[in-house]
Amino acid sequence: MSVMLALGAAVVFGSADFLGGLASRRRAALAVALLSQLAGLVALVTVLPMLGPATVAPRDLALGALGGLFGSSGVVLLFRSLAQGPMSVVAPVAALTASVVPILAGVIQGERPGPSALVGIAVALVAVFLITREGSGRAAPLDGAVLRVAATALAAGALFGLFFVCLHGTGDDAGLYPLLGARLASVPFLAVLLVTRGGGVRDALAGRGWTTIIASGVLDMAANVLYLVALRHGLLAVVSAVTGLYPATTVLLAQTVLDERMHRTQVAGLAVAAVAATLVAV
């Protein structure tokens, strides 16, 4: 069950990222991040009363809030690295480290996936790397600027991974309230960041594309819910490895909606991803 939930989270995460990317073509990326997270918060607050009672400890909300700060900081660093460097460096590093950090955390905490799952985790990391390669498949020259961008992307992915680790540390009876704590921390943080960087509420609200932004935020929240529920039924290392396959959805949507050409390396990555999911599920 946890593998299926993690696969669902990967599909929804990839869809949310695709829509967020579309919205960022019309608005500042930081404004899109803030508005989409606000939409996710509204969706969560709407749904929470329908889910019945939960036993929430202060620790659950605190871990959620800490994770929200990690995640929103990762978004900022990711946008910065994407603006400064080649996708062939940024995307593989960020996606891989977002999976590696929780995998390592799970192993350190005593998780021991079976041999098939361990092989599947390794194959999943290879799949993420292949899926997120640029069309040429060639690595960018490793000059100083590229190395700095790679370091920023490494930090962004690590922060995403820490967000997942924080969610894993919350109690099984806390329901979705850790996600509420995350959004109550991340939305004000991004708002302050937007204002201090020279933007403001008027700049954030200007322009079109509201439907895309709202859909991205709601899907992102749905993916977080699927991920959190998957953690309640499975190992952190396994769930993180499977969820890390999310770039496959983004690539497929870009090919279908934007008529972008899928390159042979990415097709191979999708095939490897299917093998990884099968191995982990065995």
Image (cartoon, rainbow, N blue to C red):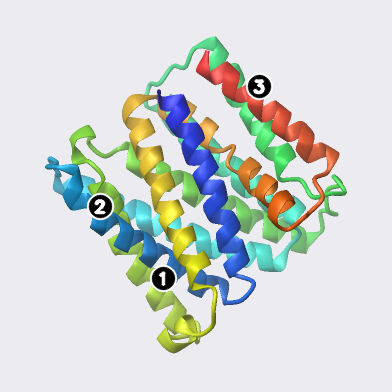
Q: Amino acid at mark 1?
A: Leu
> Mark 1 or mark 3: which comes first in sequence?
1
Residue at x 71%, y 45% (from the top left corner): 132
Quadrant of the rendering where the N terminus is positioned: top left
Q: Amino acid at mark 2?
A: Val
Q: Is residue 77 visible?
A: yes
Which sits in the foreground, 129 or 148?
129
Image location (x, y in percent) of residue 46: 25, 58
Image location (x, y in percent) of residue 82: 67, 63
Camera-side mark, 2 or 3:
2
- Kindly check if marks 2 and 1 are in contact, taking CB atoms under 8 A apart as contact: no
Residue pointed to by mark 1: 190
> Mark 2 or mark 3: which comes first in sequence?
2
Indicate left or right for 73 with 56 as reference: right
Image location (x, y in percent) of residue 29: 56, 71
Secondary structure of the residue carrying tag 1 is helix
Secondary structure of the residue carrying tag 2 is helix
- Crowding at dot 2, Cα within 10 Å, few <14 / some 14-19 / many 20+, comes out as few
> Mark 2 or mark 1: which comes first in sequence?
2
Camera-side mark, 1 or 3:
3
Residue at x 56%, y 38% (from the top left corner): 244
Q: CA distance from mark 1 to mark 3?
A: 38 Å
Residue pointed to by mark 3: 275
Which sits in the foreground, 39 or 160?
39
Q: Relative to 244, does residue 111 appear above or below in the rendering?
A: above
- Crowding at dot 3, Cα within 10 Å, few <14 / some 14-19 / many 20+, comes out as some
Indicate left or right for 20 with 50 as reference: right
- In the rendered structure, find residue 47 and report the number of the disc placed on it: 2
